Amino acid sequence: MPHVIVKLYAGRSDEQKKRIADEVTKALIAATGCSEGSVSVGIEDVAPSDWTATVYEPDIAAKAATIFKKPGYAPT
């Protein structure tokens, strides 16, 4: 039962979010062999000014051991 939460800078359309959810779902099915019905994808908008405090620090820096694709940036 994979559940993925995608956090993005705010401003994407619902159509773009749907496409992201569809592509993440396809990738999970291909990588794990799970069924489409077992996948859920949430997408959360984050204001750019809030990114470091609400995403980078708690979800990336504090959980570095769980990050399998590390970002190519550091907060400023």
Image (cartoon, rainbow, N blue to C red):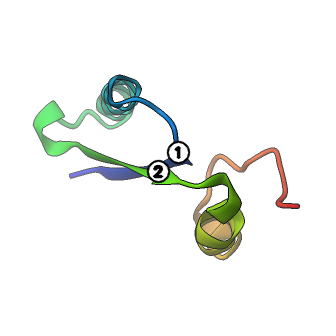
Q: Amino acid at mark 1?
A: Ala
What is the spatial separation of the Cα atoms under label 2 and label 1, in whole angstroms?
A: 4 Å
Say what secondary structure mark 1 lies in: loop
Residue 22 is left or right of residue 35, and the answer is: right
User: Of the numbered discs in the image, which one, if any, rests on residue 45?
Assistant: 2
Q: Residue at position x 81%, y 44% from top?
A: 72
Q: Is 19 in front, or is 47?
A: 47
The relative height of residue 13 versus residue 5 in the rendered view (above or below) is above
Q: Amino acid at mark 2?
A: Asp
Q: Residue at position x 62%, y 58% from top?
A: 67
Residue 38 is left or right of residue 57, and the answer is: left
Q: Residue at position x 31%, y 28% from top?
A: 18
Marks 2 & 1, CB-CB < 8 Å contact = yes
Say what secondary structure mark 2 lies in: strand
Residue 50 is left or right of residue 17, and the answer is: right
Density class for disc 2 (Cα within 10 Å; few <14, some 14-19, many ≥20) is few
Q: Position of residue 60 (x, y in %)?
A: 65, 64
Q: Residue at position x 26%, y 33% from top?
A: 33
User: Of the numbered discs in the image, which one, if any, rests on residue 43?
Assistant: none
Which residue, given by chain and number where applicable, does mark 1 sit on? 10
Q: Position of residue 27 (x, y in %)?
A: 39, 28
